Image (cartoon, rainbow, N blue to C red):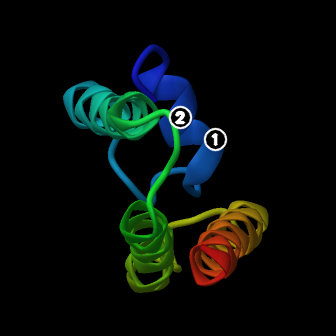
Amino acid sequence: MLLAPEFANDFYYKKGAVEASPKWQAWMGQALVGNGITMLMSRKVATKQQMQGAAVAWGTALPIMAMQKDDFKPEQLIANAAFCGGMALLCAKVSDKM
């Protein structure tokens, strides 16, 4: 998203469903990269609370995607929902073991 906003828009959304916005795509990409870097650099070993926060962050992507389900390409919606749901469950499981 950050370095290829047009590609990201065409990759995720049905043609014409979402107007391409290079500024929005770049901003969202930067937010995702920034969040990931912050999580990685915050500690050498994640805490239970960090893993719980990561589970919530991944899990909240599901209702956001559900609100936009008509705009997504069906295969992207399925793949993204499976990945985000899996990451949410994995982070929750890890936090339970801590």
Residue 8 numbered tag = 2
Query: Is 43 located above or below residue 93 in the figure?
Result: above
Q: Which of 51 and 37 is in front in this view?
A: 51
Single out the residue that lies furthest toward the top: 3
Mark 1 highlights which residue? 11
Is the residue marked by circle 1 packed among few (<14), some (14-19), or many (20+) residues within 10 Å? Answer: some
The answer to whether 43 appears left or right of 70 in the picture is: left
Residue 93 screen position, x and y as percent: 68, 80
* Mark 2 to mark 1 CA distance (whole Å): 5 Å
Q: How crowded is mark 2: few (under 14 residues within 10 Å), some or many (20 or more)?
A: some
Query: What SS does tag 1 mark?
Result: helix
For residue 33, which numbered disc appears in the image?
A: none
Tell me where residue 7 appears, x and y as whole percent: 56, 27
Q: Where is residue 66 in the image (x, y as percent from the top left)?
A: 48, 84
Q: What residue type is labelled 1?
A: Phe
* SS for dot 2: helix
Quadrant location of residue 18?
Answer: bottom left
Q: In the image shown, does 97 or 13 lie closer to the viewer?
A: 97
Question: Are discs 2 and 1 less than 8 Å apart at CB?
Answer: yes
Residue at point 73%, 73% (across, down): 86
What quarter of the picture does the C terminus occupy? bottom right
* Total numbered badges shown on the rendered structure: 2
Residue 28 lies, in percent from the top left, at: 30, 39
Residue pictured at 42% horizontal, 85% vertical: 63
Query: Which amino acid, by three-letter code, is at mark 2?
Result: Ala
- Most foreground residue, 92 or 44: 44
In the displayed structure image, the side of residue 12 where residue 41 appears, left or right: left
Q: Residue at image x 40%, y 22%? A: 2
Residue at 44% x, 74% y is: 52
Is 86 positioned to the left or the right of 42 in the image? right
